[in-house]
Image: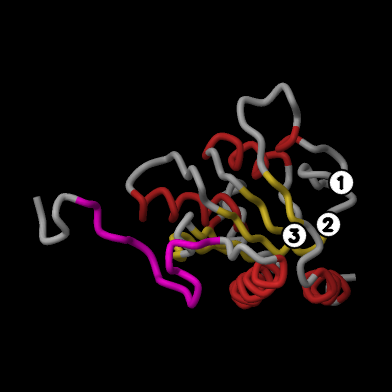
Amino acid sequence: MGDDGGRTAAQGLALPWADGAFPPATVSGRRAAWEALMGLALHEASHALASDDVPVGALVVDADGRLVGLGRNRREETGDPTAHAEVLALRQAAATRGEWRLTGCTLVVTLEPCVMCAGALLSARVRRLVLGAWDPKAGATGSVWDLVRDQRANHAVEVVGGVREDECGAILRDFFDTRR
């Protein structure tokens, strides 16, 4: 038993609302939290540009509002086809928490997850997905497919879409416009 009286010490980075009441109870409080978190995800997405990866950023916040995972696309950088921002953020969150079940966690990502990432969300038991831009070509959380709310799945994920959608879409459009 440690100094905490047998309780597990809090892990991750405390954010301004990390007081055990996450997400905030009011609609305006939730909106402010989602927008602030999406700002962090956008910042992470911008780092993907250095390795010529598609600029997508993601983060995981636990049920107490603590940042436990962060990721950006790294497929080009690593040569790993599974190195999507969401997968990397989920891996880091699991390592931070010391378990694969991310029950009560929220994943925030700048682009709607693909089939692989939606499957990872379900497998990790993530409670909520907050996304920026919808992906009408490969989105699997409401656009092309809706895997995270499929009644046949063993878990359902709440989806909050369109958070800072214009900014999230702009960084992607700018990236692809320079390659055409």
**Res 39 → quadrant:** bottom right
Is 163 left, or right, of 41 in this rendering?
A: right
Among the two numbered marks 1 and 2 on one chain, the one whose residue lies closer to the N terminus: 2
Q: Is residue 134 visible?
A: yes
Is 143 left, or right, of 83 in this rendering?
A: right
Residue type at the position of mark 3: Leu
Crowding at dot 1, Cα within 10 Å, few <14 / some 14-19 / many 20+, comes out as: some
Which residue corresponds to mark 2?
A: 134
Q: Secondary structure at mark 2?
A: loop
Is 125 left, or right, of 180 in this rendering?
A: left
Give the CA separation, mark 1 to mark 2. Answer: 7 Å
Q: Residue 97's spot in the image, x, y percent?
A: 36, 51
Pointer 1 with pointer 2, Cβ within 8 A: yes
Q: Residue 163's spot in the image, x, y percent?
A: 76, 67
Crowding at dot 3, Cα within 10 Å, few <14 / some 14-19 / many 20+, comes out as: many
Pointer 3 with pointer 1, Cβ within 8 A: no
Q: Secondary structure at mark 3?
A: strand
Q: Residue 100's spot in the image, x, y percent?
A: 42, 40
Give the CA separation, mark 3 to mark 1. Answer: 11 Å
Q: Residue 59's spot in the image, x, y percent?
A: 56, 62
Among the two numbered marks 3 and 1 on one chain, the one whose residue lies closer to the N terminus: 3
Magenta region: 7-22
Single out the residue that lies furthest toward the front: 26
Residue type at the position of mark 1: Ser
Quadrant for the C terminus, please: bottom right
Q: Is residue 55 above or below residue 112?
A: below
Which residue corresponds to mark 3?
A: 111
Q: Secondary structure at mark 1?
A: loop
